[in-house]
Image: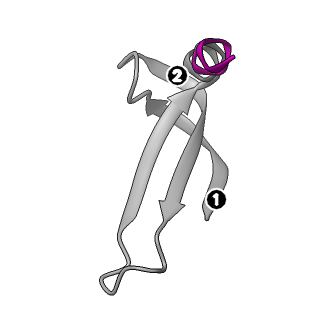
Amino acid sequence: MISSKIVRNSYCNVCKEKKVKLRELRINDYSSPTTDHMCVKICNKCLTELMVKEE
């Protein structure tokens, strides 16, 4: 399950630049006993670039 929220004034994990508005993607793995959470902050520019690469 992936949840997403908007965070403000933080650093992008991809380009390492400080951005005003970023998307925080949180991947929740409920199947594991420890319930691992992976959290990634990504700016819209990097997110768009990733989506273009996927196609």
Query: Which quadrant of the view contains residue 53?
Result: top right
Whole-number angstrom distance, CA of label 2 to CA of label 1: 20 Å
Q: Residue at x 48, y 38 (%)?
A: 41
Q: Nearer the viewer, residue 13 or 9?
A: 13
Above or below residue 27? Residue 22 is above
**Residue on which the image places disc 1:** 3
Image quadrant holding the N terminus, namely: bottom right
Query: Which quadrant of the view contains residue 24?
Result: top right
Farthest residue to the left: give it. 34
Q: Which residue is drawn at 38% across and 30% down?
A: 13
Predominant SS along the magenta part? helix
What crowding class fits label 1: few (fewer than 14 Cα within 10 Å), some (14-19), or many (20 or more)? few
Q: Which of marks 2 and 1 is in front?
A: 1
Left or right of residue 11: residue 45: right
Q: Which of 53 and 26 is in front in this view?
A: 53
**Residue on which the image places disc 2:** 19
Above or below residue 8? Residue 52 is above
Above or below residue 3? Residue 30 is below
Q: Does the magenta stretch include residue 51?
A: yes
Q: Earlier in the sequence, mark 2 or mark 1?
A: 1
Image spot of residue 32 (x, y percent): 37, 80
Q: Give the total number of marks visible in the rendering.
A: 2
Magenta residue span: 50-55
